Amino acid sequence: MMKVTLRNLCKYFQQIKAVDGLNLEIAAGEFLALLGPSGCGKTTTLLTIAGFYKPDQGEIYFDEQLVNDLPPRLRNIGMVFQSYALYPHMNVLDNIAFPLKLQKVPKSEWKARAIEIAKLLEIADLLDRKPGQLSGGQQQRVALARALVRNPKLLLLDEPLSNLDAKLRIFMRAELKRLQKELGITTIFVTHDQIEAMTMADRIVVLREGRLQQVGTPDELYDSPANVFVASFIGTPPMNLLDAEIEVGKGDYRVKTSHFSFSLPKEIVAKIKYIPSHGVVLGIRPEDLIIGEGNIRGLVYVVEPLGRDELVTLEAGDMRLKALVPSRLRIGLNDKIEFSFSVERVHLFDKETGKSLYKEA
Amino acid sequence: MTKKTGAAFPYVLLVLVAAPFITMYVGFFLRAFGEGPQLGIFPERFGLSNFSFLWEPITWGLAETTIWVALANTILFASVSGAVVTVVCMLAGYAVSRIEFKGKNTFLVLQLFLHAVPGQILLIAIFFLLYYLHLLHKIPGIALARASLEIPLGVWMTKGFFDAIPWDVERAAMIDGCTRLQVWYKIFLPLVKPGVAAVFIWGFLFAWHDFIYVYTLLPGTAKLMSTLIQSLLATEVIDYGYLAAMSLLYMLPPLTLFVLLQRALLKVPIFGGKGI
Amino acid sequence: MAVSVFTGPSIFLITLFYFIPVLLTLLIAFTDMDRTLQWRFIGLDNFLRLFGVSSRDPFVPRIIRNTVIYVAGTLPLTIFGGLFLSILSMRLRRGMGLFFRSIFFIPRAIPPVVWGFLWAWSFEGTRYGLFNGIRSMLGLPVIHWLIKYPMVIVILANGFLGISLSMLVFSSAIASIPTDLTRAAEIDGATRWQTTRYIIIPLLKWPILTMTAWHLMSFVNSYVYIMLITGGGPYYRTEVWSLYAYHTAFNRYRYGYGASLTTILIVVNIVLLLVVLRTFGLRRMIGRGKIEV
């Protein structure tokens, strides 16, 4: 088990700052997700940790050892690539045993260890096959076996599930999570899929344009997003974000949008750091909207059935809001309805900086 | 420290292997623009006197010609060859890409075989063939023979261009009332325009560079650039500067073409060069 | 039939300039045709002479030896040289790699006559040759390269011509190896050399095989560059089979005997083609080259 520390990590490609001043501590045995849209620098971060890119600034520590100049092969890490990168000319056994052979491990031992790890991953019956003869799921397991066979201190996974079909992906999510806990290897994985990150990781790092947005457990990110970007990126369907203003009266904070207004409850007022003069962004999660009761009038614009729930798009004034409601409500197109929302669960952001107005927990 | 030497290692090896060649190329270039005797790489002084063939007739032995005649001959030879390669390959390439016919696979494999067998070993027979056809000593006739060498690969090349066009385009054209020949002419040729240019240039270039066909089948004083340079090289006293300058002029058109049309040409497999 | 409109012209030209010449060669091979261009069939006389059964051709053993040495020299140079240069140049930064690959591609980009001229001039035996000029500037005596080492010069000139193609093919094959594969090898603990040895070279198996087959045929038949650089001399020391056939026909005007020499070459070609075909399999030859395993 090894802890990884990134200190002010920067990586530039010509003018583009792929990673810009990243500070991060990854605890020993932790399962950490690097999450962000494409081009956010998550893969660059991973490849820099692996040693393929040299940081332009900043340091990377494995435990207390500075590894900036250590070549990848000496870092004792395992990595599963997005394409799996199995060696097409070697069979499964040779693929898995390749790292051990390079270490000049005697044949009897490498064979035993490779078979052992193959058994763990349930691919022991595929050892004679070539990668081309394997399904996507099998290829992934072989890649995982190869990454694990030399007992790495750190495991890196680059979009490990993106090449699998939907059903297998859900299955492998659970499998990977269990395996990681069982082996206890510090693991960093890169994904653009927030559900993947939420379901698997102990902590999630949200990146955007090379900059850290927020680090936290899945619940922390969901319940108290640090800024508008995280708020809109985490959670499906995404949070409703509305322009609003806060009017301060006598002991009363009133949030006004172009169509409705409401008073903030005390527990929210207590969390607010400051009131910006230039307006705020009001965030309401779709599941916090209550349809059929309340004093806001709206029109049903679209209904998208999701099975257990329905995703309803409401038109209210010049705004459109998405609401997640139980299917049994039987809402029809163009219905005129009243709705409200749980005021104690709203989010408020500074309109200019996008940062949350709430104090950090 | 060791890492630095490790990174420099490929450079050192490559420079070692490349050095003689770079010397040859640079020496050649300087020779063309040099005057007076040249020892090693650098000439005594620089000047354009080596390019005197541009304004004076060229003589070797008792024969005489001008550079413009040689250039005109070469352009004629290369253009005919390029045009033949283009038309013939564009037709055949369409057929093997789009039409199912008996013997299609045999036809394609045959082209591969022929591509592997260098046609230059058949020159004795081709000499007689042209003689009986009364095409010997005639530039277009020799160009036709030279063009045939490029057909096997050309068919594969054009097949590649046509393969890239969606079948629906062809189906739509046929529903609109085109015959196959009209589809080829009205739809496909415009669609593969860069390909047409590439095939033409490719046929043109190989003919432009050709030496052995012209040398063998067009004897006497009618010279193309390649045979002219060879004749001057075969004389008793060789003026290397003069030859270097003429070679430079000879290489100029293909180089210009290549630079201008680099993009289109890069899609073409440069597999030719049977003259090895 | 409609299809003949498309295939007709190519079939016509191929028949005219490949098949008929092959038949014509076979016919002429059984005559003693000379510069009068009279057909007079003399049965197997040419071949008997060639194989040393009657009135032996004294040059044949020497020509065979030259051809074997020439192919045995050029082919490994082309394949190993191409591998060496492509692997090295692909390690460099893009621009530098491209620079070196261009240097080694020039032989194929320039006309044969100019390539021949470059070598003839560079290795000319007087002070006016390029390398002897440099030597004499350094106070070294001139070397008569083309007289002392004609075969070496010819092998180098043709070998580097082969390299220009094999290097290009190998380089693009290396470029098509996904970066993930070499990165994975590095993660697995492989050094640069081990990655090359265990990952890159095995993945080049198919291009190496094709290039070997291709250049084997090419070198067996090649004579144009030898003709331009040494003319087969000095005194037959670089005269290979195909050049001997050419000289016999066009310099000594013994078309009949030249055709019989060519006939042997055609037979060798067909045998080589069949061997290549057996090794590669027809299907793979028509199929597109991917990374083959």
Image (cartoon, coloured by chain):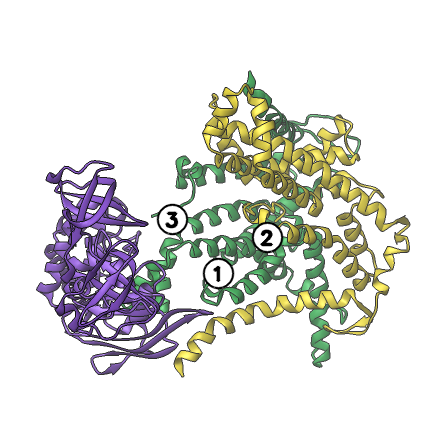
Chain colours: A purple, B yellow, C green
Q: Nearer the viewer, residue A328 or A165?
A: A328
B72 over A38 or under it: above or below = above
Q: Position of residue C99 (x, y in %)?
A: 56, 64
Which quadrant would residue A165 be assigned to in this image? top left
Quadrant placement of the C terminus of chain A? bottom left
Q: Secondary structure at mark 3?
A: loop
- Residue wearing tag 2: C66
Query: In the structure shown, which secondary structural element does the residue marked by tag 2 occupy?
Result: helix
SS at badge 1: helix
Between the C-alphas of marks 3 and 2, the distance is 37 Å
Q: Which residue is mark 3?
A: C291
Q: Say which amino acid is labelled 3.
A: Ile
Q: Residue at x 73, y 63 (%)?
A: C121
Residue A135 visible to an observer of this rendering? no
Side (left or right) of C11 relative to A158 = right
Residue at left 20%, top 74%? A359
Alpha carbon separation for disc pair 1 and 2: 29 Å
Q: Reply above or below: C240 against C48.
A: below
Q: Earlier in the sequence, mark 1 or mark 3?
A: 1
Q: Nearer the viewer, mark 3 or mark 2?
A: 3
Question: Would you name the residue on which mark 1 appears?
Answer: C86
Residue closer to the observer: A341 or A176: A341
Side of A356 relative to C253 (left or right): left
User: Are discs 3 and 2 located on one and the same chain?
Assistant: yes
Q: Distance of mark 1 from mark 3, alpha carbons?
A: 17 Å
Q: Position of residue C124 (x, y in %)?
A: 72, 65
> Which residue type carries mark 1?
Ser
Q: Chain of mark 2?
A: C
